[in-house]
Amino acid sequence: MKKIFIPIIAAALLLSAGAAFAEKPVFNDTDASSGNIYKSDIEYWASQGVVEGDGYGNFEPLRQPTAAEFVKMLVLASGKTEVPGAPVPRFSDVSESDWFYPYVKTAYQNKIIFGNGDGTFGPEEKMSFQRADKMCTRAFMKPPIMADVIDDFSRSAAARLLTLFENSAETLIRVDGGAEASEPRYGVYKTVAEALDAAPVVSDEEHRVVISVTPGTYRERLVIDKPFITLTRDELSSGGVKLTFYYGASRNYKSYDALTEDMEYPSREDLGSDEEYAAAVKDYENKKTLLDGRPYVKSDGYVSGVGTQNSASVTVTENAHDFTAEHITFENSYNLYRTEEENGDIYEPESEADLSLTENLDEKKRNEAWYKSAEARRRDVTVSENKDAQTQAVALRCSADRSYFIGCEFIGRQDTLYIKDKARMFFTDSYAEGTVDFIFGDANAVFNHCRIHSAAYPNGGYVTAGSHSAKQNRGYLFFCCRLTGDESLNALENSKKVKLGRPWKPDALVVYYKCYMGGHIAAGEDRFADMSGNSRENARFAEISSRDADGSYLSGDVYADYEYTDDARYKFARFRDYLDAPFDKEKDEPGEPDGWDCGRGVTYDYFDDGEMIDGRPVWYDDENLYVIPETFNKK
């Protein structure tokens, strides 16, 4: 989303003043030589009848406009008209005889203005940048141009602001969970799902679609399948935006049941070959989770469920490339708490007999574990007390290449953040929380100045489970991140503390560079772990220049075993070319890099690895100023 400080705009922006116009009215006081840098904007809007002078040939470009003046300019510039049958304003300080009443009425009916909350509009109040920007977003249905409060908002700056909004190709869609119903006419929707459905499919960055969400909790299972979408918190509102749902991977839910009444289990007699019959059964099973109100037992004897992928509260598909999320919390509540919606939706077996267990011991073992976990959930046992209560429950599953996450939070327990399909992603000033493998998959991802928090778990847990291929040379990079954990994890014996990672696939690639490690992280040879027959020694794990929570460099046997200083396969992590190499999507065939700037201009050299101030890590930016990301203050 663009943020432009109007008083100091680059010269290139000053040349554009909207569409061409034939005759330019000349005001006595708008000459550029007198310091008015927005002369072309003023003259363009004058030619359109949007702005006018004082009757004596003067525009008064430096005078601060009143609310009434700006509403008139905005209504005319955006082409808004009265809405037949819509309510009329009842402001105590606005009457039908006022010159500005028609414009206030039109703005009110088009939901551009709502008043001051005390029954007044304040027509003579001086306009500010912030208030004008907010009105423009509603009138033009385009993202805010700037969100910072600047006091010296002038009539010339107002003309420039209108030009910038008119010329912007971006689309703004707003979500307000407190609305009684969706109002597509005004670009406002009650749910995020409706807003996503209404979003146009665009093909480039210039036409990006911004979905601005009013703070609140949205309990929706979402799929984002369109490119160039930005999901952001309403910048002019206070509070957070939480997107949450409750699916657990091995559970069965009525809302996930895709079987229709006319579907029947495939008949062997109706199909000509074993291959056709097997395909028909597989198709049936893929569409079915419950049968007659009971968990459906698949042909292999395993009780069905939504699975890890489909447990995701929010899924961002491969089609949604160039996705951005700003200041959004993604949560899966399954292992955290139960909701009324979940209680009415989930199937919970009452006895092991309900699972129709087979005689196959491996299958029986899986089903018994499913029942044991469900039983723990019914008794309200928490994950920190008994790991049987936990199952995979994804907060965000993302396959979108060139994705950005800025100031976001990812909350869950097992498998919180599933980043996959070799997509490139950049996380900055964000927060991830979980217990087991809570950052996993084969994405190429940079975590820049993020906080990675391990929640209480009986045997410590694992931060990452990478599934990278041998061809991938980026994997996960944790740069200047802070690793924290619940207090109970510090008391565990070393071998049971949190591991930095384990290889889901043999060539998992995870690098920790200049990170702060809390006392909950295991030391020495327990720093990383094996997984499913994949050896930690053969995986590509590296940890370089780590510090403890107090800011002191780690040394000796604390982490030396996993620096791999003598192994050439890991030396790439010690060179600048690993950090500075082009961040290009892995391809099966060689191709030209697309030059994606993963850090949007952030160069790692600009940051020192920090020091501690008042018990918190800080860094220097490129202007040698302290940087303390807000997310680090999270408890």
Image (spheres, rainbow, N blue to C red):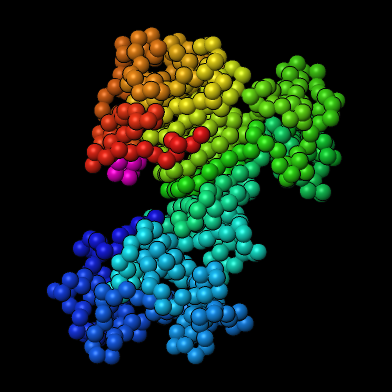
Query: Furthest-left residue in view?
Result: 33
Q: Percent from the top left, x then y, of residue 433?
A: 53, 32
**Residue 376 horizontal side relative to residue 223, left or right:** right
Residue interval drawn in magenta? 596-603
Comparing 97 with 163, the one in front is 97
User: Magenta part mainly helix, strand or loop?
Assistant: loop
Which residue is at a point 52% across and 60% down the rendered structure image?
Answer: 174
Residue located at (43% from left, 61% from top): 143
Instruction: Using the image as rendered, state which of residue 553 and residue 78 is in the foreground.
Output: 553
Q: Is residue 79 left or right of residue 256?
A: left
Q: Position of residue 257 (x, y in %)?
A: 74, 43
| Residue 558 sits above or below residue 319 on the image | above
Q: Residue 280 versus residue 502: which sits nearer the camera?
A: 502
Q: Quadrant of residue 479?
A: top left
Relative image position of residue 286 (x, y in whole percent): 69, 39
Asked whether residue 131 appears in the rendered view, the answer is yes
Residue 356 falls inside the magenta stretch: no
The spot of residue 26 in percent (x, y) is 21, 85
**The N terminus is located in which quarter?**
bottom left
Say which residue appears at 52% left-offset and 72% top-offset.
Answer: 115
Residue at the image point whose x is 38% and y is 72% from the top? 126
Q: Is residue 601 magenta?
A: yes
Residue 278 seen in the figure: no
